[in-house]
Amino acid sequence: MLDIRLDPQGTERLIAGLRRVSEVSTARRLIQAASRDALQPVAKQARVLVPQPPAPYAWGDLRDSIKVRSAPLRARTWSRAKTVVVVTAGQWYAHLVEFATVRTRAQPFLAPAWRAGREQAQADFSGHLWRAIGRAVARHARASAGGRAGRR
């Protein structure tokens, strides 16, 4: 669970800034960016935990395919979120390594990486989100002062 605390002195200024950048798309973009940044250490740990195959097959394809990305939410859930941010392994056989087959034992790498980095990712998320909000407020202030609204 995320624990975000506000100091009473900066609350009014933050709320005013959020109202200025209250576009739904901006909020979603900020949350997705903060989520991607917070999950990078989990992806890094998963890359470390990927088992290395024997010498003639040690290409590192599975390790190199582990990425943090945004994906559309396809399942019916209680959430109103349109997208989720996930750590994925892009190789077709990743689930066979993670969960085993009839002939091979499981060699999990994603689940242990998540268990090891979950609390830190949740803590990092709030910090990344506050920094992203601060940048968005500053960008909006510059744009309303006569400049453009930053990069698109």
Image: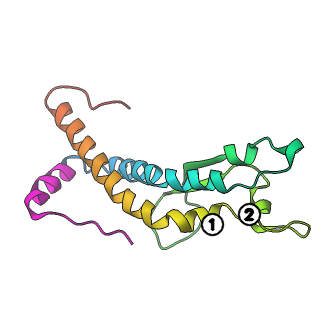
User: Which element type, helix, strand or loop, lies under badge 1?
Assistant: helix
Identify which residue is drawn at 38% across, 53% down.
31
Q: Which mark is residue 135?
A: none
- Give me the residue at 39% from left, 72% from top: 1
Identity of the residue furthest to the left in this view: 9
Question: What's the CA distance linking mark 1 and mark 2?
Answer: 8 Å
Which of 38 and 71 lies nearest the eye of the viewer? Answer: 38
Q: Check residue 102 for magenta coloring.
A: no
Q: Earlier in the sequence, mark 1 or mark 2?
A: 2
Residue at point 75%, 64% (across, down): 107
Boundaries of the magenta span: 1-19
Q: Which mark is residue 98?
A: 2
Q: Are marks 1 and 2 in contact (CB under 8 Å)?
A: yes
Report x, y in % for residue 92. 78, 52
Q: Please rate how many residues cluster around mark 2, counting C-alpha atoms within 10 Å: few if below 14, some from 14 to 19, many from 20.
A: some
Label 1: which residue?
111
Residue drawn where x is 41% and y is 63% of the image: 122
What is the chief secondary structure element of the magenta stretch? helix
Relative placement, left or right, of 149 versus 30 is left
How many tags in the picture? 2
Q: How is the image coloured?
A: rainbow
Amino acid type assigned to the residue bearing label 2 in the image: Glu
Q: Position of residue 94 (x, y in %)?
A: 75, 56
| Dot 1 amino acid type | Ala
Residue 10 vs 78, above or below: the answer is: above
